[in-house]
Amino acid sequence: MAKIRTVGTTVRGIRAPIAKEGDDLVKLVVDSVLQSAEAEGYELRDRDVIGITESIVARTQGNYVDVEDIAQDISRKFTGDIAVLFPILSRNRFSLILKGIALSGRKIYLFLNYPSDEVGNSLMDIDLMDEKGLNPYIDVLKESEYRQLFGARFLHPFTGIDYVQLYKDLAVNNNIEIYLANDPRVALQYTKEILVANIHERKRTKKILLQAGAERVYGLDEILTEPVNGSGFNPDYGLLGSNKATENSLKLFPRDCQPFVDKVQEVLYEKTGKKIEVLVYGDGAFKDPRGKIWELADPVVSPGYTSGLIGTPNEIKIKYIADNELANLEGKAKTEAMKQKIRAKHKNLVGRVESLGTTPRQLTDLLGSLCDLTSGSGDKGTPIVLIQGYFDDYATE
C-alpha cells in the first residue's frame, strides 16, 4: 500500500551557539543545521529553505556604530539647523539615532506623524483626534498644543512609553523642538536642511521636499553608508534597519548578504548534494490586528537571498475550485480531481479565476515573515530557521 503523505510545510527553529564578531557564520549555520538533522532524525531535501536572522549576520560582521559616529556624519553632511522628518516611535530603532543627531550640536526640529507613525505606533487616540476637529492632512501641532489637547502624557499601549517625552529628553542643551505634522513641506518653514527619517515612504518624502525647495536632503539610508573612524556601515541602507546594542551603540543592518547566502547554499550542496535555498531575514511583513502596528521596521524583509526565492507563489484556491468546478464530486474522486487540477494549473495564474482569493506576495516576504514569527525577537535562541515542504502542494506525494 502506498504511503499517504499527511504533512505539508514544516518549520523548525534551529538552536545555535551565541555568535560573536569574527565567527565563521557559514560554518556555524551549516554545522547547526546538519547537527539538528542528525539529532532529530530528519533529512534535508531539495528546495528546503534556510533562514538566518539579520542580527546574527551583522554581529559576526561587527557592523556597529557609536552615537559619536552618527554625530560626526551628521556634522559633515549638514551645515545648519536640521529638520528630522517622520521617524518611527521606538526606543530600539530611533532613540539612539536621535541621540547621535543631537550630539552634533545642531538645532533640531523633529516632526512626528500623527495620529500614528509610519508603522502604526500611536501618538493619540484617533477618535479623540476626530472629536477635537483635527485634520491630520493640514493641521500642525506644537508640542504644547499636543499636550493641551491630549493630556500631559500619552503612553504607548504596548510599551507604556511617552515617546514625545522620550525624544525630547535626548536633547543636548535643549536643542530639540517637536511638532506633529504629516505634510513634509511644513518643515521648510524652519530650515531648508532636512533629514528624512521615515522608512518605506522615504523616496516620496524626499521628492516632495526637493520639489518644494529644500536645499539639502538626506535620508537615514544615507547616513553611515561608509565607515566613520573605523565604524561599521551599510552602503545600501545606512542607519535604516539598525537596532540598539548598548546605551551608546547601534547594530546596523547587515551588509554583503548576497555572497553570504550563496556560500551557505554552496557548502550545503557540497555536504548534502541538495539544492537548498537560503535567505537572511529581518522583520516580518505583517500587521498586529489589535495594536494596528505593522511589524516591518526594517527597510526590507530580506536583504539577501538565493535565486530560487525570486518571484511569487503560483497557486489555485482549493476552496474556490471545490465549491464551484468540483462541487458535484465527493470523497476520493474529489481529492483526485483536485490533485489533477493542481498538476495541470497554468504557469501564470495572475488574474485567472481559479486563483481568486490568493495573494501572490513576494516569496521572500512570505518566508521571511514565517521565519521571524518562528524565531521571535526574545530568548528562543533559534537564529536559524529550516522550512521544508513550502514549495510542495496538495498534489505532491
Image (cartoon, grey):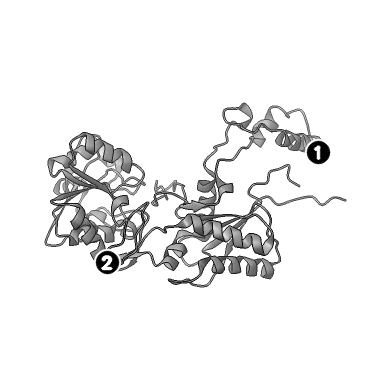
Mark 2 residue element: loop
Which comes sooner in the sequence, label 2 or label 1?
2
Label 2: which residue?
A: 229
Q: Position of residue 394 (x, y in %)?
A: 71, 43
Q: Is residue 287 left or right of residue 43?
A: left
Name the residue at 73% across, 29% down: 326
- Residue 223: which numbered mark, if any? none
Q: Position of residue 337 (x, y in %)?
A: 77, 34
Name the residue at 68% across, 43% down: 393
Q: Nearer the viewer, mark 2 or mark 1?
A: 2
Q: Is residue 205 visible?
A: yes
Marks 2/1: CA–CA distance: 69 Å
Label 1: which residue?
A: 332
In the image, what residue type sits under mark 2? Asn
Q: Position of residue 306 (x, y in %)?
A: 55, 51
Task: Judge by depth and name the residue closer to the eye, 368 or 155.
Answer: 368
Mark 1 residue element: helix
Q: Is residue 88 visible?
A: no
